[in-house]
Image (cartoon, coloured by chain):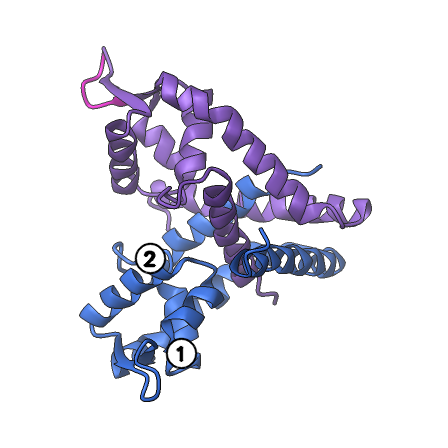
Chain colours: A purple, B blue
Amino acid sequence: MIFIMKKINTISRCAVAYRNDVLNDKSLSPLYHSYVLIISKNPGISQDELAKELCINKSTVARGVASLEEKGFVERKTDDNDKRILRVYPSEKMLEVLPNIRKAIREWNKYLTDDIDETEVEIFQSVLERISNKAKLYMESREEGEI
Amino acid sequence: MIFIMKKINTISRCAVAYRNDVLNDKSLSPLYHSYVLIISKNPGISQDELAKELCINKSTVARGVASLEEKGFVERKTDDNDKRILRVYPSEKMLEVLPNIRKAIREWNKYLTDDIDETEVEIFQSVLERISNKAKLYMESREEGEI
């Protein structure tokens, strides 16, 4: 059996430090860039869909989105047809930071993988995709009450 | 260029959900298992060393350790020779949860990688290690003020 989580978590945490350095804000949540990418791409996404997309629980998303709203990055509106659904829209401020976040992600990816041989990279990506799908499958079966 | 961070973050976040399900505590911090593993293995580790090991900043570690102390998982003591150094020791309670955490990590690793061909796994691990080292290298050069 292989153990991969320590390295996966290291890469993920160092990425947070890198982004916060580049975006020059030490207080950004580890989820900040994911919120910006997903909400900008899906204006009006519901909080529940956002939780699913991020693989985190609904209460964490609710807190995260409330904090983004306080800082003027998003607006929340109740769905016209179903009052239980809260929809999240990016503000001008969020759309303004988007290019910088995309640039930071591109550069971090480049930094990490620049020295690695192309064939190895292909295999790595293919395995990473399968593992990531397996991880998401766990979340789905969990929601359906199977696990 | 390859984009790997979305998948890496997905795997990392789903692992948090899995561990919290298995350990039957929805309120555990994403860093909880890492704290338990590192502090149990290194009794008396300083908060600064812990921050370095975890690739997170010192104030986040200080908050995390304070919360663990409140819950009775660790004790903090000032270093005998240098009053600026805070050392962290695992409590009995932490050592008691350790086997369950190790089991959860083993089972999650097995779940993620069980279907993957051995040769692919070897290449995956080798690339993952190089990428993780590159990520840590960023943290080190950052500390030395090079970046």
Q: Earlier in the sequence, mark 1 or mark 2?
A: 2
Q: Is residue A83 magenta?
A: yes
- Name the one closer to the observer, B112 or A32: A32
Q: For numbered disc 1, what is the local secondary structure?
A: strand
For the N terminus of chain B, which image quadrant?
top right
Q: Is residue A79 left or right of residue A136?
A: left
State which chain disc 1 sits on.
B
Outermost residue toward the top?
A80
| Quadrant housing residue A76 | top left
From this viewpoint, is residue B51 visible? yes
- Name the amino acid, label 1: Ile
Residue B12, position in %: x, y? 47, 51
Residue B59, position in %: x, y? 33, 59
Q: Which is the main secondary structure of the residues drawn in magenta?
A: loop
Image: A69 above or below B144: above
Q: For numbered disc 2, what is the local secondary structure?
A: helix
Mark carried by residue B20: 2
Residue placed under numbered mark 1 in the picture: B45
Residue B23, position in %: x, y? 32, 63
State which chain disc 2 sits on.
B
Q: In percent of the image, x 37 and y 82: which residue is there?
A: B44
- Name the one closer to the observer, B143 or A140: B143
From this viewpoint, is residue B111 visible? no
Q: Residues within 10 Å of mark 1 (few under 14, many from 20)?
A: some
Residues shaded magenta? A81-86
